[in-house]
């Protein structure tokens, strides 16, 4: 009897052990189990089941990382695209969409580095990973519940649906000429914005040569740029929040970028398109969420002399003329410095009346560019630095500065001086300067005799004993001034080049040029 009871107990124990072992085997969890048992992932589960991907994700012999959009993410996508869940399930590319959310390896959130690019099971496009503090993004979607582990991988819940669409980010990432721009976008954590398939945007993309030139002009390294606290603002000044193809642009368009600290000025000159001072060298590289135009220069949000006159209510005619003459690229260059003598609208009205022409006649004049450049010096000269005498303009002709009664440029009065910007200064005039009409004040300036010329150390001045002098470089900037001593000026410290000397005494003014060897 006792033997039979023992045998019965042993048989019962063996059966229980087998059930327990089966239960242990059954208790293994797949990534499909993690998703399908979540109350927040019923919609993606439905899609997985319909495409028969549950079998794949349930296979413990495979390893997966699944970026699983939660119900809120999918509902948001459906609302934005004006679809229903049924429409999504009927999408012929649904399997491809789901497989774009799968990586064939176990990738923990702690193993993700900012800027990582992963190839998913649907390799029509890559996944771009961004780490911003404690936040992790895959393309535009943020991981809202990471590292839900399974025996064949893990699940990261995300707050948006991913699409394998080609984006503006892909255009630059796939380009061999935009490595600096891509590094900057990654460092600024802007990949989520540029990979959003439901946003549309235009990216003005400086190539590597453009960045090299900008870094040289700024005297900094690429590392300095990437660590600049304003990096994001610099990049967002290159992005418009709508798709704008080159054919949609007109000369003089002013666009507001995502960094709206300043506007972008568009110039079209024949076949050439400029964004501020940068030439578009490869237009209309299209993506599913916008377009990319490649630039030959980096544009900056710096306020320029162009902004000073554009933002003025009293310079509409001057702005129209600058646009028509295609001079905005020159005036918006952040690395050039200029002085602009800016006639007001009233000044232009009086000038047009005096000349017997209309504003349309002026804008159509073949001399328009020459007239405008006659108002510009190739360096920054504040009113306190102006000296009486001739100064050469970008037109090549001279204007005459008269300081005897306020400040006059030829026959025009400076009525508002020193409107400063990051690349120069604007002085407002009450009349238009016309290079075709020599100022009457030119008659009061006599030719100065200098020797030796070229000079090495000193210049001897003939005919003047007591006078003040000013030495200007070829750009019109004051490089030396003082009182004449024994008819001699020391020029030893000047760089090699051509200079102008202006002399003033109580009776006359004189000027001449010399070469410093």
Image (spheres, rainbow, N blue to C red):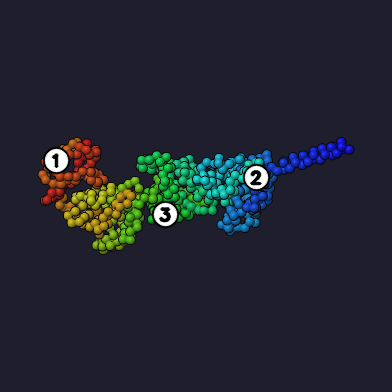
Q: Where is residue 151 drawn, in percent x and y?
A: 66, 41
Q: Position of residue 158 (x, y in %)?
A: 58, 49
Cα distance between the residues tagged 1 and 2:
90 Å
Q: Is residue 304 visible?
A: yes
As displayed, is residue 253 above or below residue 14?
below
Image quadrant where residue 460 sits: top left
Can I make out residue 364 in this image?
A: no
**Front one among 87 and 326:** 87
**Residue at 39% across, 48% down:** 300
- 3D distance between C-alphas at marks 1 and 3: 54 Å
Asked if residue 4 lies left or right of residue 239, the reply is right
Q: Viewer-proximal residue, 172 or 130?
A: 130
Task: Please tell me which of labels 1 and 3 falls first in the chain.
Answer: 3
Q: Position of residue 50 (x, y in %)?
A: 68, 51
Q: Which residue is mark 1?
A: 488
In the image, is 279 to the left or to the right of 504? right
Position of 349 with respect to 117 (left or right) is left
Q: Which residue is mark 2?
A: 31
Q: Earlier in the sequence, mark 1 or mark 2?
A: 2
Kindly identify the residue that appears in the image at 23 percent across and 46 percent down. Answer: 478
Residue at image location 33% in from the left, 55% down from the top: 308
Q: Are marks 1 and 2 in contact (CB under 8 Å)?
A: no
């Amino acid at each position: 009897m006792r033997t039979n009871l023992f045998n019965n107990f042993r048989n019962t124990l063996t059966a229980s052990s087998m059930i327990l072992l089966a239960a242990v085997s059954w208790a293994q969890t797949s990534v499909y189990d993690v998703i399908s048992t979540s109350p927040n992932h019923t919609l993606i589960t439905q899609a997985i089941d319909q495409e028969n991907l549950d079998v794949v994700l349930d296979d413990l012999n495979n390893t997966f990382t699944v970026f699983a959009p939660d119900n809120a993410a999918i509902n948001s996508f459906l609302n934005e695209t004006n679809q229903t869940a049924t429409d999504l399930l009927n999408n012929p590319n649904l399997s491809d969409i789901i497989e774009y959310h799968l990586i064939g390896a176990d990738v923990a959130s702690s193993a993700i580095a900012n800027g990582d690019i992963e190839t998913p099971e649907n390799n029509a496009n890559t996944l771009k990973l961004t780490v911003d503090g404690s936040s992790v993004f895959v393309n535009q979607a943020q991981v809202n519940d990471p590292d839900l582990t399974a025996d064949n991988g893990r699940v990261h819940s995300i707050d948006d649906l991913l699409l394998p669409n080609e984006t503006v980010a892909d255009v630059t990432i796939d380009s061999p000429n935009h490595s600096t721009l891509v590094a900057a976008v990654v460092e600024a954590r802007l990949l989520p914005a540029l990979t959003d398939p439901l946003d549309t945007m235009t990216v003005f993309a400086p190539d590597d040569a453009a960045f090299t030139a900008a870094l040289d002009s700024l005297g900094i390294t690429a590392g300095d740029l990437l660590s600049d606290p304003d990096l994001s603002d610099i990049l967002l000044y290159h992005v418009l929040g709508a798709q704008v193809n080159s054919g949609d642009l007109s000369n003089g368009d002013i666009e507001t970028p995502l960094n709206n600290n300043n506007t972008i000025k568009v110039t079209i000159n024949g076949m050439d398109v400029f964004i501020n001072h940068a030439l578009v060298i490869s237009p209309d590289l299209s993506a599913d969420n916008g377009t990319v135009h490649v630039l030959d220069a980096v544009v900056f949000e710096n306020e320029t002399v162009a902004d000073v006159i554009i933002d003025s209510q009293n310079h509409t005619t001057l702005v129209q003329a600058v646009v028509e003459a295609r001079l905005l690229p020159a005036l918006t260059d952040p690395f050039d410095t200029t002085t602009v003598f800016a006639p007001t609208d009233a000044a232009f009205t009086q000038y047009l009346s005096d000349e017997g022409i209309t504003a349309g006649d002026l804008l159509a004049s073949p001399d328009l560019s020459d007239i405008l450049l006659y108002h510009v010096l190739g360096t920054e000269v504040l009113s306190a630095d102006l000296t009486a005498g001739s100064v050469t303009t970008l037109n090549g002709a001279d204007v005459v500065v008269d300081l005897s009664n306020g400040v006059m440029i030829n026959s025009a009065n400076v009525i508002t001086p020193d409107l400063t910007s990051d690349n120069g200064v604007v002085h407002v005039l009450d009349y238009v300067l016309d290079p075709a009409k020599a100022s009457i004040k030119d008659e009061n300036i006599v030719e100065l005799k200098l020797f030796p010329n070229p000079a090495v150390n000193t210049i001897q001045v003939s005919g003047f004993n007591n006078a003040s002098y000013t030495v200007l470089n070829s750009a019109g900037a004051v490089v030396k001034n003082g009182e004449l001593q024994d008819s001699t000026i020391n020029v030893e410290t000047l760089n090699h080049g051509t200079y102008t000397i202006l002399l003033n005494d109580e009776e006359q003014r004189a000027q001449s040029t010399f070469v410093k060897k």
